[in-house]
Image (cartoon, rainbow, N blue to C red):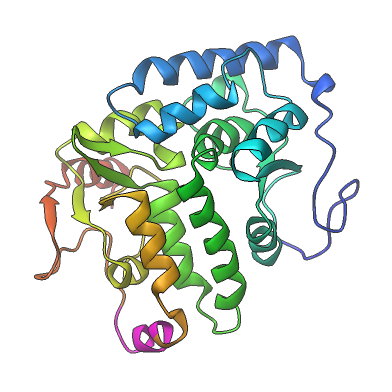
């Protein structure tokens, strides 16, 4: 990815959403995706996520207009949603987060991609990420992550910090009085992974530990082999704000990475997975 914004984008990589240019078919596909996921998520998604869906009116019909969505979000937590043409450079992404702006792709998947697409689209970005930005604690965590991301680039530790985003913001689980719930955007926006992350015996589910997460590799090509479980959003924010990451990055430089399937003696294992899904997928691929 180059560092120069594409044609039509501002210097911060944002573009006008041009909501009026989405077609009736695209709005209908959003509604189809929305209905499918919201039918599945009660009893599975974190209560804070479900509350955000309601308070932001994401089910009002069709792809949300970012201007109206940002007005609602700004009143709740001071965040806004801005459109970008696709993936943006890391420093641009962190700068937006640090200033309470969430970047969202300005395109919607095609009907034949309803279950999977490689690059995040407006459904993943808005349905998956934005509801939790209506929660003040999680909204503060995302800002803190953006500020930490800008600092991490000074230490050559971006690959470490990316794992924190992956295992919380994208694929995090949370412990609640009613049991484990999903909150990561990559899970809540996916029909298959919404079921897999909680119900399947295959993946490991491990209590969240910051050092452990920063050392753990992840996979981008299939369902996760491990999920990390936070006790609360307050605990996640507290850990992030109270940790001095500079010496932590230095400490981790001398430690080997941990594979996504590995379990350590000191792990708090909530569920030891069979890894059957990953093994079967590898067999099908001839690996």
Q: Residue furthest right?
A: 8
Residue drawn at x 67%, y 51% as measured from the top left: 87
Q: Is residue 133 left or right of residue 269?
A: right
Q: Is residue 142 left or right of residue 270?
A: right
Q: Is residue 247 above or below residue 46?
A: below
Q: Residue furthest front?
A: 75
Q: Residue 222, percent across and down?
A: 37, 44
Q: Residue 133, percent across and down?
A: 54, 42
Quarter of the image for residue 111 reads top right
* Residue 80 visible in this rendered orientation of the protein: yes
Q: Nearer the viewer, residue 223 or 164?
A: 164
Q: Residue 247, percent across and down?
A: 41, 88
The magenta stretch spans residue 199: no
Q: Nearer the viewer, residue 140 or 127?
A: 140
Q: Which residues are magenta?
A: 248-256
Q: Is residue 205 left or right of residue 12?
A: left
Q: Main secondary structure of the magenta part?
A: helix
The quarter of the picture where the N terminus appears is bottom right
């Amino acid at each position: 990815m180059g560092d120069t914004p594409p044609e039509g984008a501002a210097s911060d990589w944002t573009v006008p959403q041009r909501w009026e240019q989405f077609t009736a078919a695209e709005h209908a596909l959003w509604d189809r995706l929305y209905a499918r996921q919201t039918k599945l998520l009660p009893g599975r998604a974190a209560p804070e996520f479900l509350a955000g869906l309601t308070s932001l009116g994401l089910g009002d019909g069709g792809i949300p207009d970012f201007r109206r969505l940002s007005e609602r979000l700004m009143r709740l937590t001071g965040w806004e949603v801005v459109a970008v043409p696709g993936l943006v450079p890391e420093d641009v992404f962190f700068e937006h987060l640090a200033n309470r702006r969430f970047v969202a792709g300005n395109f919607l998947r095609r009907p034949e991609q309803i279950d999977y697409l490689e690059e995040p689209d407006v459904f993943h970005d808005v349905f998956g990420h934005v509801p939790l930005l209506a929660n003040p604690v999680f909204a503060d965590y995302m800002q803190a992550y953006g500020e930490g991301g800008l600092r991490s680039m000074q230490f050559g530790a971006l690959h470490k910090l990316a794992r924190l985003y992956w295992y919380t913001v994208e694929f995090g689980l949370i412990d609640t009085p009613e049991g484990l719930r999903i909150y990561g955007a990559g899970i809540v926006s996916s029909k298959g992974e919404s079921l897999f992350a909680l119900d399947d015996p295959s993946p490991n589910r491990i209590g969240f530990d910051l050092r452990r997460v920063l050392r753990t590799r992840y996979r981008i090509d299939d369902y996760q082999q491990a999920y990390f479980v936070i006790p609360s959003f307050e605990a996640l924010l507290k850990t992030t704000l109270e940790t001095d990451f500079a010496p932590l990055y230095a400490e981790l430089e001398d430690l080997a990475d941990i594979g996504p399937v590995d379990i350590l003696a000191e792990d708090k294992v909530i569920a030891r997975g069979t890894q059957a899904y990953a093994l079967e997928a590898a067999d099908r691929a001839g690996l």
